[in-house]
Amino acid sequence: MDNPGVFDFPPITRLHHDRTRKIHTVLRPGTEPAPSGLGQATDYCLAHHVLEGAERAARAGERATFDWYTANPHADAPFISTSVGPRIVIAPDLADLPRSPISETPYYLLGTGTEQAPIPLRTLSAGAFATAELTGFGTLLAAHAVVVVLLRTKQLGQTLDSWTITRLPGTVFLDHVGEPVVLARDLIHEAGHNWLNDALTATGCKIDDQAEFHSPWKQSMRPAFGFLHACWAFPLTMLYTAKALEHAEGDVHSFLTAYLDQQRGYLATTVADHPRALELVGEQGLRERLAAVHRQALTL
């Protein structure tokens, strides 16, 4: 990433601080929020897990679980050390992932039964964070990929599913192939979605949901919100991949080369529509960041 400063966006920093304090005030009225010492972005991520966990426990009438969440504002989660700071890496049984109205996709909440992922997966994740930092994406992952939920183990070349949900900012859900350089790509993609969601919230930008643009990634017309997300997250992975290819070898090099070639073709078809979609973003600083990343990726 030639300009990692693109991820330093003061409105997001303010959002993390203010939203965390509000959540702690709701859960523990009359008490002063105590920082975890792990950073504002981490506290922001964990506060959302605690809020969702407490709400779910309250609706289910599970008093002991509710009390645990309100007594543990940082979710008492196990961390591993990485180059971008302490991270939570877990690999839950997919059958245990709930679905509910808060998300169209399965999700996971930190809680009393949270356990760290096995050592090989923790090592894989630490390697992915290190690779992302070396290629200029450490700032992005430090603030927007705090909780890593590893899903299915797949083979290189198989379709890898990954996602985020807006109710759990800073959390990413990903399949993996056991290669840090590939996991780093997908961490950057999902952290990019988290960053943009926070940026839109922090600046109060409401994207017109009536406007639609053709998405080459979905091969269909998509609302401006989804189109802008794709035109941000995929270019980020392109910029990362171009850097990662300098050191990749063998099958991984071939895989990433094919990925970058594919993305070049997709992104080229958005050249006319992207400026029109950006007109719907009312905050200049955010609009300029989205334009700069898209423009840089087009040069690859």
Image: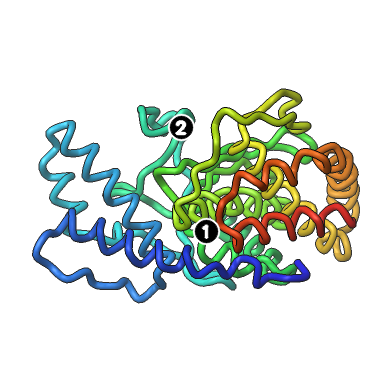
Q: Which residue is mark 1?
A: 144
Question: Does residue 54 appear to the left or right of 184 in the view shown?
Answer: left
Q: Nearer the viewer, residue 69 or 282?
A: 282
Q: Is residue 43 above or below residue 110?
A: below
Residue shown at 27% from the left, 49% from the top: 51
Residue 221: % across, % down: 70, 25
Residue at horizontal 59 percent and vertical 49 percent from the top: 281
- Mark 2, residue position: 106
Q: Which one is closest to the eye, mark 2 or mark 1?
A: 1
**Which numbered disc, 2 or 1, marks the residue that appears first in the sequence?**
2
Question: Callout 1, which amino acid?
Answer: His
**Looking at the figure, which quarter contains the C terminus?**
bottom right
Q: Classify mark 2: helix, strand or loop.
A: loop
> Which residue is depicted at the point 17% across and 71% down?
32
Residue furthest to the top: 220
Quadrant where the N terminus sits is: bottom right
Q: Is residue 117 visible?
A: no
> Regarding mark 1 in the picture, which secondary structure is present there?
helix
Q: Residue at x 83, y 43 (%)?
A: 271
Q: Quadrant of residue 269?
A: top right
Residue 49 appears in the picture as rendered: yes
Q: Tell me the amino acid under the disc marked 2.
A: Pro
Query: Is residue 51 left or right of 103 when viewed as pictured?
Result: left
Q: Position of residue 23 (x, y in %)?
A: 25, 56
Query: Residue 31: which quarter of the image?
Result: bottom left
Left or right: 122 in relation to 93: right
Q: Position of residue 287 (x, y in %)?
A: 64, 56
Most extreme residue toward the bottom is 37
Q: How is the image coloured?
A: rainbow
Q: CA distance from mark 2 to mark 1?
A: 19 Å
